Amino acid sequence: MTDEVQRSTFNVQRSGDVEEGVGTQGLIFNEPLLFDQGSKGRVGCTLPECDVPELKPERLLPRKLLRRDIPGFPELSEVEVVRHFTRLSQHNYGVDLGFYPLGSCTMKYNPKINEEVWRLPGFSQAHPYQPQSLIQGALELMYELETFLAEISGMERVSLQPAAGAQGEILGMMLIRAYLESKGSPRKRVLIPDSSHGTNPASAAICGYQCVQIKSGPRGRIEPQAVADMMDEDVAAIMITNPNTLGLFEDQIADIAKIVHAKGGQVYCDGANLNAIIGISRPGDVGVDVLHFNMHKTFAVPHGGGGPGAGPVGLKAHLAPFIPIPVVEKKGKRFVLNEDLPSSIGRVRAFYGNFAALVRAYAYIRSLGPSGLRRVAEVAVLNANYIMNQLKDTYHLPYDKFCKHECVFSDARQLPHGVQTLDIAKRLMDYGFHPPTIYFPLIVRGAMMIEPTETESKETLDQFIAAMKRIAEEAERDPELVRSAPHKTKVSRLDEVKAARQPNLRWKGKAPRLP
Ligand SMILES: *Cc1c(COP(=O)(O)O)cnc(C)c1O
């Protein structure tokens, strides 16, 4: 990069101005598919002459498993393969490439120190069948992580087993069910706010409960009276997300918990939005009985690509007898796995959960420490409020309140020009940004849910704000430009439903060339 280019990029960022295509231009090449490249006999690596007699494949494998040839199999050199996959990786978008304001998902930067720690051979090469005497360090890490998460959330115990937040919800509801059964009846219903994440009702239903919706009040929060009106001895629990998916703190959660407890019910907290309150407020202190954490959100474990996350579950002492086995305990100076819990609901995951995700989260917590974790929440909330205030004159803000980690706009002001949320999201890609979460939460028509996280600089936020404002202008001046976006991506607007239901993954005949 010449000095001049560098300087001009810097100036664009400083002035908060924005250029269309910031993130989508540059040295990104189109190339043929692998199947169209290479030539017969080209190889990626050559092996030394064989110094033992060669056996025909027929002598090694049953004939029916042998294939004469693989039609169209690409034959390529090593560098062609490396370039191909490196280019493909550049056609994708990730947190390491740019701003990813996907509301509710907490797409924060994943510090590389976490990867370094996880790659230490004692962690990455440990085997779950190793004797406990040889994995003392790994057990100690799980023991300490449980202690940290309990301290952070105000809970008494934590199960590290669930593989994701959604599985944590199922475990939480199984614990509540087991507890209530031990008291005589599992009960029938679970109360769930209308702003909840879809996994909440799904988890309650899987555990055999009937879901009843509670309407959010005019402040975008759950009103204690609404809970009191629905609460009776058939209600097993309330599942409440705090801060909720509108990015608002459920400031009456303590009163709600009292109402639920008075009728013998339990309080489940969906802790996916813990990023906004970590180090400041503890769900366990305001009456929550069980909650899940999302390691791949709050605790900077890489998120997406189908990679494993983790959804540990914190619980109060009365639920502890039902915790999944095994649990890590400390006996003198040694750490041991205890399977001897007669009331345990059993296992919810092979071995100890996604250990690699747990190590990364542990490294994150240790590298920030208590004051650093608190700072995470403070800056995440500051960033979200900055965006909310900068954009509220341009986009309709259904709940104009001080927000937590995310803010929710709608397309109400752009609709009269024929431009809707989906179009705005697509057009953002032309400006080099990943779109926010759209059409969720369901209680806001045409929702755009923006979560900046604490890891973004003011310059990045300013660029994003400038792009959003520019798109609003375009919607008035040239709605068709927005409606037909994106224009600068590898492929233009896709039929998303068809792409999800009938993915075209198979190569047949002559491969189609990318546009
Ligand atoms: C992400 C999320 C979940 C589900 O968590 P996963 O780890 O994706 O299974 C549940 N509730 C809310 C509010 C979320 O944002």
Image (cartoon, rainbow, N blue to C red):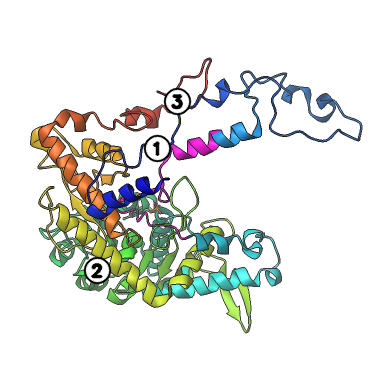
Query: In the figure, 21 relative to 309: above or below?
Result: above
User: Marks 1 and 2: CB-CB under 8 Å?
Assistant: no
Residue, x 25% and y 50% (percent of image)? 463
Decide if ligand 1 comes within 8 Å of the CB at mark 1. no
Could you tell me which secondary element the residue under label 3 belongs to?
A: loop
Front one among 53 and 321? 53
The residue carrying pointer 1 sits among few (fewer than 14), some (14 to 19) or many (20 or more) residues within 10 Å by Cα, namely few
Front one among 343 and 165? 165
Q: What segment is highlighted magenta in the picture? A: 84-111
- Image quadrant, ligand 1: bottom left
Return the mark for residue 504: 3
User: Marks 2 and 3: CB-CB under 8 Å?
Assistant: no
Q: Main secondary structure of the magenta part?
A: loop
> Which numbered mark, 1 or 2, is in the foreground of this view?
1
Q: Which residue is mark 1?
A: 26
**Three-letter amino acid code at disc 2?**
Val
Q: Position of residue 361 (x, y in %)?
A: 48, 64
Q: Position of residue 92 (x, y in %)?
A: 43, 39
